[in-house]
Image (tube, grey):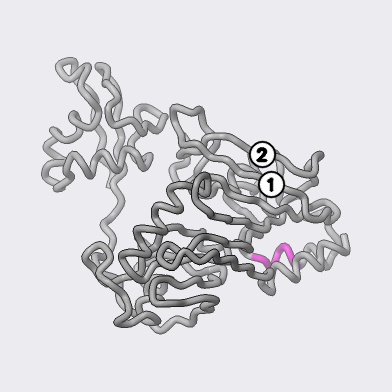
């Protein structure tokens, strides 16, 4: 639902969150000031064409505000018998190797058939009341069409510990997240660091983009060349932060978008003409961005054991690598 407002002269100088909290339409929609602040910080409020994340911003007369409020998510996902590839499990957490195409958490348009639904069925009575509801504690996510490793909490203690770990991004606590990405072109250097803030795209709200610091959040990706593959490359990307679509946005930002990424690499479709017939067929059959969460390492939040997991390329990406080798 989209709400639009224009700031009248008498409201000039008001805080953004306070101004919104006093709008009758939002009061009637039961949107509290706390909820409005969260929506602002999530990039769902725009002034003019620019997204604004600062709830304390002071408004000026005539400011045109647009607030996009997403539909509410179901309060309690249901168990569904969906196969899982569990690579580790104990009483506190489990690590799964997620296939491409599986949504992590129920949301608008994907209320069922998600990883959370599968985990509720898998864990059964072993789940504690995380957030007051018995469901898995999702502390990080990977895109629907990205495959690979994901850790999930089963108990409140594990949930709290893993949340702290991922909020720290591995700076003081032990956390390793490395992805394998097939990208167009070949970076001139063998490795590098992309430090560029990420926020909502100014006009295409479903996309993220590299934006000025005041409009986005810090985002840092370390990348390293693994193998040149003709007109493409296989690179390893290690996350220092965990922003939405981070690797996809950052690699496109430096001119090497992911193969198969219709959102951030659409302009590179013509590159398929440079491929061999076998490689062209593999790319066209992919149907997703060529990204895989290959390595996940962390300190167990309860036992303090150092854990490290690795996932081989799934069949579609293994076939892609072999096919690209013929180009």
Identify which residue is drawn at 50% across, 46% down: 172
x%, y% of residue 9? 18, 15
Secondary element at tag 1: strand
The stretch drawn in magenta includes residue 260: no
In this rendering, is residue 58 above or below 94? Answer: above
Tell me the crowding category of disc 2: few under 14, some 14 to 19, or many 20 or more residues within 10 angstroms, Cα based. some
Q: Quadrant of residue 220?
A: top right
x%, y% of residue 62? 27, 19
**Segment tinted magenta in the rendering:** 282-286
Residue 200 in sight from this viewpoint: yes
Nearest the eye: 98 or 290? 98
User: Residue 193: which numbered mark, if any?
Assistant: 2
Q: CA distance from mark 2 to mark 1?
A: 6 Å
In this rendering, is residue 165 above or below 97? Answer: above
Identify which residue is drawn at 22% across, 23% down: 7
User: Residue 223: which numbered mark, if any?
Assistant: 1
Q: Quadrant of residue 272?
A: bottom right
């Amino acid at each position: 639902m989209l709400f639009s407002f224009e700031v009248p002269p008498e409201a000039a100088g008001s805080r953004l969150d306070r101004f919104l909290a006093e709008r009758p339409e939002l009061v009637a929609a039961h949107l509290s000031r706390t909820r409005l602040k969260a929506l602002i910080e999530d990039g769902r409020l725009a002034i003019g064409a620019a997204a604004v994340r600062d709830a304390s911003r002071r408004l000026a007369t005539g400011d045109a505000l647009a607030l996009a409020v997403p539909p509410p998510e179901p309060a309690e996902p249901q168990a569904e018998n969906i196969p899982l590839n569990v690579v580790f499990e104990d009483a506190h957490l489990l690590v799964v190797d997620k296939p491409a195409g599986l949504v992590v958490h129920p949301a608008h348009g994907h209320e069922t058939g998600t990883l959370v639904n599968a985990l509720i069925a898998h864990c059964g009575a072993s789940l504690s009341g995380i957030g007051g509801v018995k469901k898995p504690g999702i502390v990080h996510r990977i895109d629907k069409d990205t495959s690979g490793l994901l850790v999930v909490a089963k108990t409140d203690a594990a949930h709290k510990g893993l949340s702290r770990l991922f909020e720290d991004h591995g700076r003081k606590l032990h956390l390793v997240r490395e992805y394998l990405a097939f990208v167009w072109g070949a970076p001139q250097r063998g490795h590098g660091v992309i430090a560029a803030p990420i926020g909502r795209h100014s006009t295409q709200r479903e996309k993220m983009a590299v934006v000025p610091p005041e409009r986005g959040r810090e985002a840092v990706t370390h990348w390293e060349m693994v193998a040149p593959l003709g007109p493409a490359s296989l690179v390893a990307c290690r996350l220092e932060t965990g922003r939405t679509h981070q690797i996809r946005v950052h690699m496109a930002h430096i001119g090497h978008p992911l193969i198969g990424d219709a959102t951030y690499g659409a302009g590179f479709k013509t590159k398929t003409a440079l491929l061999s017939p076998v490689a062209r067929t593999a790319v066209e059959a992919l149907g997703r961005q060529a990204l895989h969460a290959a390595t996940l390492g962390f300190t167990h939040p309860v036992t303090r054991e150092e854990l490290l997991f690795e996932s081989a390329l799934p069949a579609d990406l293994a076939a892609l690598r072999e096919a690209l080798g013929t180009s």
